[in-house]
Image (cartoon, helix red, strand yellow):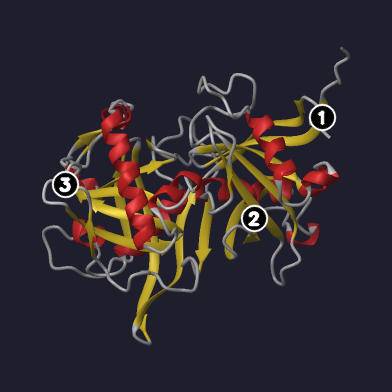
Amino acid sequence: MSAKPQITLPATYMRGGTSKGVFFRLEDLPLAAQTPGQVRDALLMRVIGSPDPYGKHTDGMGGATSSTSKCVIMNKSAVPDHDVDYLYGQVAIDHPFVDWSGNCGNLSTAAGAFAIHAGLVDPTRVPHNGICEVRIWQANIHKTIIAKVPITQGRVQETGDFMLDGVTFPAAEIVLEFVDPVDGDGAIFPTGNLIDRLEVPETLIPGGVLHATLINAGIPTIFLNAEELGYQGTELQQAINSDNAALAKFETLRAIGAVKMGLIDREEQAKTRQHTPKIAFVAPAQDYQTSSGKAISAGELDLHVRALSMGKLHHAMMGTCAVAIGTAAAIPGTLVNLAACAHESSQPLSSVTFGHPSGTLTVGAKACYQDGKWQVSKAIMSRSARILMAGEVYIPAMPE
């Protein structure tokens, strides 16, 4: 039996925020993979090394976590006043599926830098020294992101002294603006409520009721109170991810919330929509120790947030979920806002610093109540990004 040789594809492996992913220019993909469909999904899964029943991604570029099983496809934008289109795929680890339902806020940082590296931004827009504002069209959710990328001697500056909790080494700071970050038809709260009562199985929650803030901003997110779940809000990954019963409970609650938000019709559909919505729990500020052993005092924080991604507690915080946190904090009466204002009356917060398993993150949002509903013009945060490797990725020839 003769075997076909491997094929090669130009690719760039990048860290963006606390995530890593394989970046492609659309034109560098095989013709059949330049349009959405099974061929594209199969190619990206093989690049990452999925599905992998061993959960290791040994035979691919993935890292067997939700933060590292990611692919990005970019090209020059046909959308007016935008430089590039950015399409993000979250690759499942142990079964054959690529989720295109949402954005990755962390890799949005790398998208701005990659756009310049890959020659997708008009060279006249790139200063010799200064900041290049890359206007990104996020093609998954049809939203604008502005990445303010530092440039030194005409090239992306990747090194610097900006520290991001969850990333070991310093790098250059990239400021991200998520313009009009509300998903869908512009309704921040799909139920119309700042806080909903979720009816849940009493086998999961005594009394069968949880309070939740269901929000569409950055990424659809379900916020719950840590105390109602039996948690402190300062938990690290091991406390949640080593508890299979807790993970199953969170997935059931995520499915219930997804139905309530109108994202799916039946709870079982959540199995094929792992990337969205996210589920997170909040608690007032308190002293804690990060996963690296660093002590953080309550006085350095406004609140705690722990979020799950692809069925596991995230080691830091997803960028899109941070947008949801900043948006919810800006609106008085949400669970996020109430947790941040634990000892004061509820009030709008233009920015918050929250604790996550790896440290802290500050995010801001501009919100106003207009025409009978809450509106958010933008959310802002700082991240960093750098190229880890560039060249060609090898994969076995795909079936014709």
Q: Quadrant of the C terminus?
A: top right
Picture quadrant of residue 6 = top right
**Residue kind at label 2, given as amino acid type:** Gly
Question: What's the residue at 53%, 21% (across, down)?
Answer: 56
Residues at marks 3 and 1, CA–CA distance in whole angstroms: 53 Å
Can you tell which of label 3 and label 1 is closer to the viewer? 3
- 37 to the left or right of 107: right
Picture quadrant of residue 14 = top right
- 103 to the left or right of 44: left
Question: What's the residue at 34%, 62% (across, down)?
Answer: 260
Residue 73 makes an appearance in the image: yes
Task: Give how far across and how far down residue 307 sits, in percent.
Answer: 35, 44
Residues at marks 3 and 2, CA–CA distance in whole angstroms: 57 Å
Task: Give how far across and how far down residue 323 sits, in percent.
Answer: 42, 57
Mark drawn on residue 202: 3
**Residue kind at label 1, given as amino acid type:** Thr
What residue is shown with label 1? Answer: 8
Residue 158 makes an appearance in the image: no
Q: Are marks 3 and 1 in contact (CB under 8 Å)?
A: no
